Image (cartoon, coloured by chain):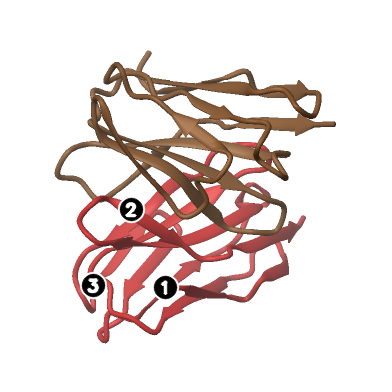
Amino acid sequence: GQQLNQSPQSMFIQEGEDVSMNCTSSSIFNTWLWYKQDPGEGPVLLIALYKAGELTSNGRLTAQFGITRKDSFLNISASIPSDVGIYFCAVLSGNTGKLIFGQGTTLQVKP
Amino acid sequence: DGGITQSPKYLFRKEGQNVTLSCEQNLNHDAMYWYRQDPGQGLRLIYYSQIVNDFQKGDIAEGYSVSREKKESFPLTVTSAQKNPTAFYLCATRRSGGDEQYFGPGTRLTVT
């Protein structure tokens, strides 16, 4: 089936550092979403991307929709301890609203 | 207070028993989804419903059943046929015409 490859699988960084993670696919998708999941909670939508080449920011977060429509990246600037969690990319598959999720990137921030 | 409610947060059952997980929403969203999450893995789609009285199987529907009698509610039953039911279960909704899904807080089911 269709898969998203998300990397890195995990990151352990110092507070204040910038972070970058990405997501790639072998297929073209027209909507890319980034979610964050805190431990024991449901994922929360961070950024939605609808147009190839689009660069969107949400506070310290910046995400880009790749021009080929087969990839996306998420950057976090000046990380803080509350950035800890699992970050998922997701793409919209078909016309039923089904999402395909990446395996997630686990981020740990050392104060 | 608007949103998606999943209850209970933690659920414990003995093997061989069916158990029903609740998902309620007051966002007036048409579509609802159930996902399963295992440690270190992404979300896998169990069932989804785009409209009341209609639902479709997702990628891992075996051993699960759902109903959609009301727009606000989409309960998931984990049957005794599900071989490995212990997991974190997440419910999500989507408004008609939108692409984004919004998630509830999840229910952690432990079967022993």
In this rendering, position of residue B66 left or right of residue A21: left
Indicate the quadrant where residue B17 lies. top right
Q: Position of residue A16 (x, y in %)?
A: 64, 64
Q: Residue B84, relative to residue B95: is it above or below?
A: below
Amino acid type of the residue that numbered disc 3 sits on in the rendered structure: Glu
Q: How many marks?
A: 3
Label 1 chain ID: A
Q: Residue B35, relative to residue A52: is it above or below?
A: above
> What residue appears at the point 47 percent right and 55 percent down from the top-left corner?
B59
Label 2 chain ID: A
Q: In front here: B106 or B112? A: B112
Q: Nearer the viewer, mark 3 or mark 1?
A: 1
Label 3 chain ID: A
Amino acid type of the residue that numbered disc 2 sits on in the rendered structure: Lys
Q: Which residue is mark 2?
A: A98
Q: Which mark is residue A2?
A: 1
Q: Position of residue B39 (x, y in %)?
A: 72, 52
What secondary structure is marked by label 2? strand
Q: Colour of chain A?
A: red
Contact between marks 3 and 2 (CB within 8 A): the answer is: no
Q: Which residue is mark 3?
A: A54
Q: Which mark is residue A42?
A: none
CA distance separating discs 3 and 2: 22 Å
> What residue appears at the point 21 percent right and 64 percent down from the top-left corner?
A50
Q: Earlier in the sequence, mark 3 or mark 2?
A: 3
What secondary structure is marked by label 3? loop
